[in-house]
Amino acid sequence: MNRGILAGLAAALVLLVLAGASLFTVVQTEQVLITQLGQPIRVISAPGLHMKVPFIQTVISFDRRLLDYETPGEEVILADQRRLIVDSFTRFRITDPLQYYQAVGSAEDAIRARLNSVVTSSLRRVLGNEQLLRVLSSDRGRIMGLIRGQVSDEMRGFGVTVEDVRLRRADLPEENTQAVLSRMKSERERIASQARAEGAEASARIRADAERDRTVLLAEARASADRLRGEGERQSIKIYADAFQQDAKFYEFYRTMQAYRESFGNGQSRLVLTPDSEFLRMLRQAPGG
């Protein structure tokens, strides 16, 4: 009886071991490849409980989610001989486990090393035909599209689908950065000097125009003043002449009185004259009728 129980227990244990070795679970984030004695047999992508031949067949799991890979910074020479330090990241997915296994095996690091080589080569090829301004402008999307297309074509033979390749950083080397900054400073100084020179030229032109207008205005004003003054003097002489012709004796008397008033008006004037001087004639005798 004891032997029967022990045999039953042994059989049950063997069945449990066989069942454990035969059954396996595929989760939704995985896909598996079944190999038999190292040879791939089938791919299972549907999640759930599955069976295999115990001890002969092996289950190799592959992640079916979107995977990331970041390349380290690489120095790239552009078409205009500029140098850039470029690093990127790649999003990819294992879509054919059998082809992936046959190409690089089951290790995930193997595909990352291959992906690094492919992405770096594509970066050098594409950026080697582009100029710096295009890489740093809105044309960058087109450039990344070219890189993504080349990487996707090369990685398709590894059972991998490349979803996206992006340039994360594109910087000038330190020595190039200083050279660019120096050129930018020189260019700004040149522009500032040109602006100052143009401003000085405009200022001199405006001053010259203002000085010319001032000279013209003053000349016209002097000419007008001389003309008016001459006209006034002409009229004054005419008036005096007309007055003198009307009464010459009165005009002579009037002018003499004016001279006396100007000479003796302040009471402190001194004149050295002879008594029979013509200037004193009106003081010696009254004018005739």
Image (tube, rainbow, N blue to C red):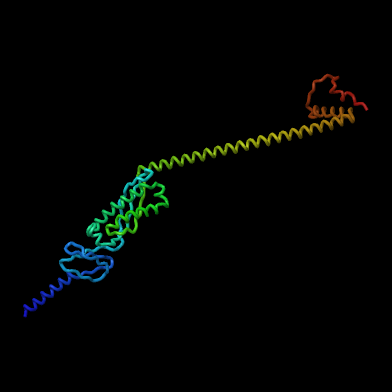
How far from the left and from the top, in percent, is residue 156?
30, 58
Q: Which corner quadrant holds the N terminus?
A: bottom left
Looking at the rendering, which quadrant does residue 215 occupy? top right
Q: Which of 192 and 258 is in front in this view?
A: 192
Identify the residue at horizontal 65%, vertical 36% (top origin).
Answer: 214
Q: Which corner quadrant holds the C terminus?
A: top right
- Left or right side of 279 for 81: left
How far from the left and from the top, in percent, is residue 39?
19, 62
Identify the residue at horizontal 35%, vertical 42% (top origin).
Answer: 175
Identify the residue at horizontal 90%, vertical 30% (top origin).
Answer: 247
How far from the left and from the top, in percent, is residue 7?
8, 76
How many circles with numbers are drawn on the protein?
0
Identify the residue at horizontal 28%, vertical 57% (top origin).
Answer: 157
Q: Which of 254 and 111 is in front in this view?
A: 111
Query: Farthest bottom residue?
Result: 1
Looking at the rendering, which quadrant does residue 235 occupy? top right
Reply above or below: 142 against 202: below
Q: Can residue 167 be seen in this view?
A: no
Reply above or below: 244 against 47: above
Query: Farthest right residue?
Result: 289
Q: Can residue 214 be seen in this view?
A: yes
How far from the left and from the top, in percent, is residue 40?
21, 63
